Amino acid sequence: MDWNSLTDVSLPAVYRLTMPAIEVETLDAAVPNSVVARRLPGSKCRSKCDLMRTWYSAFELPDYCHCNWDSFSDCIVHSPHNLTGPPNTDRISIVAIIQDAELALDQEESGELVTLTSIVQNRSRELAVLNSSIDPDAIDWPSKLTVIFHTRPDHKERFSERLTNSGLAIPEIAL
């Protein structure tokens, strides 16, 4: 799979990626203009509010975004005002790479990880429907929202166990 595949609205919105941390940094150079990708350190996303604040900061979202799932669900797609692709391109896709994913939301109940993935999947599906039914120039919606949970190889088992305990089945990708 490559970066352009992540913009395909028919594909899942949440993935797992296992690779050494240093290799993740090399991905930045391969990101196409139609994708706005931000890396969110799992160490700064250990609680729900920390995750949301880190996300809001990474994507430069407005101050009215708060630390609750309703606000998060609205803000991650309703406020991409500063995230535009280059001239003469289609809408941008938003990709959040949560690095050291085994740390993300580890101070919360396992249900919070389920909630996060559900929101991302639902909002991405809604974007696909919305973007297929409106004038592309009428509104600044992103074309797709994707989250990639990155773990280093030595932490893959720990994150896999969290996913299993949460009842989540997230496909693994290679970029």
Image (spheres, helix red, strand yellow):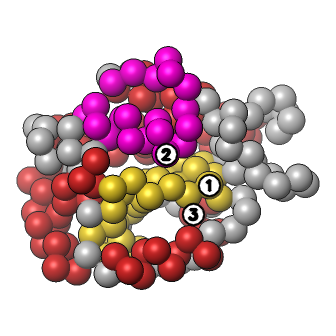
Marks 2 and 3, how far apart at CA: 19 Å
**Residue 156 percent coordinates (x, y):** 19, 73
Compare marks 2 and 1 and give the one earlier in the sequence. Answer: 1
Marks 2 and 1, how far apart at CA: 11 Å
- Say the numbered circle drawn on residue 36: 1
Compare marks 1 and 3 and give the one earlier in the sequence. Answer: 3
Nearer to the camera, 121 or 142: 142
- The residue under the point 32% across, 40% down is 51
- The residue under the point 33% across, 66% down is 150
**Residue 24 percent coordinates (x, y):** 43, 75
- Residue 98 shows in the view: yes
67 with respect to 62 (left or right): left
Label 2, residues with CA under 10 Å away: few <14, some 14-19, many ≥20:
some
Residue sticking out furthest to the right: 88
Question: Closer to the observer: label 2 or label 1?
Answer: 2
Magenta stretch?
48-67
Q: Amino acid at mark 3?
A: Leu
Q: Amino acid at mark 2?
A: Ala
12, above or below 64, in the image: below
Label 3, residues with CA under 10 Å away: few <14, some 14-19, many ≥20:
many
Q: Are marks 2 and 3 in contact (CB under 8 Å)?
A: no
- The residue under the point 61% across, 30% down is 79
Instruction: List the residue tagged with mark 2.
Output: 58
- The residue under the point 39% across, 53% down is 40
- Report if residue 62 lies within the magenta region: yes
Label 1, residues with CA under 10 Å away: few <14, some 14-19, many ≥20:
some
Q: Amino acid at mark 1?
A: Val
Secondary structure of the residue carrying numbered label 1: strand
**Residue 169 percent coordinates (x, y):** 26, 59
- Say the numbered circle drawn on residue 6: 3
Marks 1 and 3, how far apart at CA: 11 Å
